Image (spheres, rainbow, N blue to C red):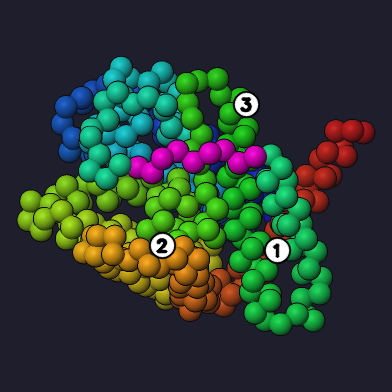
Amino acid sequence: MMKEYNEELGALIKVWIVAILCISYCYLIPMRMIKKNAMSRLISLLPVITIFFILPLPFTTVHLSFVVFFYLTWLANFKLLLLAFNRGPLAPTPPLPFFVFVSVAMLPIDLKHSPNQKKKIDPAPAPVPAHKPFILAFKAIILNIIVDFYKYKHKLHPNVILALYKGHIFLTVELGLTITAFFLMIFLGFDLEIEPQFNEPLLATSLQDFWGRRWNLVSSRNLRAVVYNPTREILTPTFGKLRSQQLAICVTFLVSGLMHELLFLYITRVQPTWEVTWFFVLHGVCTAVEVGVKKTVAGRLGFMHRAVSWLLTVSFVMVTAVWLFWPLLLRNGVCDKVINEYSVMVNFVMSKCMGMKA
């Protein structure tokens, strides 16, 4: 597997070169030749958006497939869609310098100041405080403990193994994105800010809190800008503020479900079963209902203690994930593949470090 990992690292370099060339095209051609017509800009950007949907295909390892999909197919494409309509971090006035444009397009970073941003219908959550180093170190230790527990997998109850899988994947994603942010902060000297990744999602006291303010905030921010805000803006004159908000929530979760379905298609290479999409549709409907109840009762649910709302929220997320989200990963051996790749990755890094010392 080490040989396969080396080959895919080589493919990753080639993919990143292609991506940089594509973003350079977006900077040098469409925005210079066509400045006012949104549809013309969108058409000129569609070839790049299409290429970014294709770029994850060469990869068979879960980690690298996820990296390419998340950074290019998801984040970069969403930012390019915003750019087509003169919105988002790539379309400030005056235009961004070239290297800043490429960095913002391809990485989970944003401008600190975006003077041309239109007023948002639904303001983004307040900035999330950066993780303290000792908390990240503690989570890294927990991740290593989880990996060590896999040695005794044959002696553990299936539910315990499932809990270990959940912790492993969550911590891997959180630490991976946070480490990426750390290196970006060191090497990029622009007036940029690192987009927060997670905000202790297990402390959520409602579905709105979990999905909007705590879980995968990079994706949430992009979905809010690309799907939620435009949908609500279009629907408000017809359905009113509350109904348009609820419908926009459902549409946003549907798009998120389809993007996750596409991610798992790249990772598993099996025909979609749509369980993951239904997971997000269910959460979208429930979140919309939750918003409606909150607006209707207007504070009359004050009797519900935060501990109770926390228990209900976390329980609902866990139960529905076991029902609809995790079966696809377990059925296709993705979790075991992630474990094996993690070990290979650690050995690869250790061997490189030893080689540098020698």
> Most prominent secondary structure in the magenta stretch?
loop
Point out the tag, 1 or 2, that comes first from the N-terminus. Answer: 2
Q: Quadrant of the C terminus?
A: top right
Badge 3 vs badge 2, beta-carbon distance below 8 Å: no
The location of residue 54, given as percent across then percent down, is 43, 51
Q: Secondary structure at mark 2?
A: loop
Q: Horizontal and vertical percent for residue 219? A: 42, 49
Is residue 268 depicted above or below 138 in this figure?
below
Residue in the foreground of this view, choosing between 322 and 101:
322
- Residue 135 x %, y %: 68, 46
The amino acid at mark 3 is Ile
Question: Do callouts 1 and 2 mark residues in contact (Cβ within 8 Å)?
Answer: no
Instruction: State the residue position of label 2.
Output: 206
Q: Residues within 10 Å of mark 2 (few under 14, many from 20)?
A: many
Name the amino acid, label 2: Ser
The residue tagged 1 is: 339
The label nearer to you, 1 versus 2, is 2
The answer to whether 348 appears left or right of 117 in the picture is right
Q: Residue at x 36, y 31 (%)?
A: 89
Name above or below for residue 1 compared with residue 218.
below
Q: Could you tell which of marks 1 and 3 lies nearer the N-terminus?
A: 3
Residue type (three-letter) at the residue carrying disc 1:
Ile
**Where is mark 3, residue-wise?**
186
Q: Find the magenta span and give its range.
A: 124-132
